Image (spheres, rainbow, N blue to C red):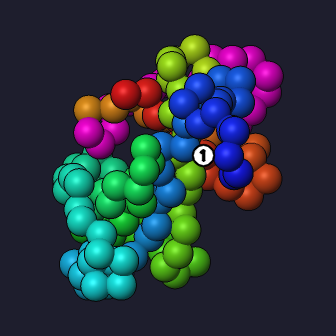
Amino acid sequence: MGAGHDHDHASSGKLTELDHVGIAVRDLDAVVEWYQKIFGATVAHRERIESDGVDEALIKVADSYIQLLTPFRDDSPLAKYMEKNGEGIHHVGYRVDSTEEVLEDVKAQGARVVDEHPRTGSRGTTVAFLHPKTAFGTLIELVQE
């Protein structure tokens, strides 16, 4: 955007910021190395998310992240997704003030959800996913810090 735009308080309704773009990868270390070599990027956070069966590396970009994800279990949702779709963008995470409130609101409006209730995500966040069939083919993650 050009000069004069206010980035500090720009939001769109219940979505306060872009939290991250989740990218499914087969070799997490190789992809991290590529981002470091090509863009000079540094990893801000690494975590194994047992409940989802994934390892993640977060690369900070302004106030958002690139979330690189690789499955460590063959039965994880990400592993199943990658069997069908391969590597690439997996989901988009939007920050919200209250995952619980937004989730209840979208459910009341008839949206299909993956998570009926908010749960713990990486970095100690509270998250919930909306089904891609509800969101025009995009898996959406609601993220409350």
Residue 115 versus residue 30 in the image, above or below? above
Residue 76, located in which quarter of the rendered image?
bottom left
Q: Nearer the viewer, residue 35 or 67?
A: 35
Circle 1 residue: 140
Q: Is residue 1 left or right of residue 7?
A: right
| Element type where label 1 sits in the image | strand
Q: Is residue 90 left or right of residue 66?
A: right
Q: Quadrant of the C terminus?
A: top left
User: Which residue sits at x=21%, y=53%?
Assistant: 45
**Residue 120, horizontal then vertical, whole percent:** 32, 32
Q: Nearer the viewer, residue 28 or 33?
A: 33
Asked whether residue 76 is in view, the answer is no
Residue 60, located in which quarter of the rendered image?
bottom left
Q: Is residue 116 left or right of residue 32?
A: right
**Residue 98, horizontal then vertical, whole percent:** 50, 18
Q: Going by the picture, which residue comes out furthest to the front?
A: 3
Q: Is residue 72 left or right of residue 126?
A: left
Stretch of the chain drawn in magenta: 103-123
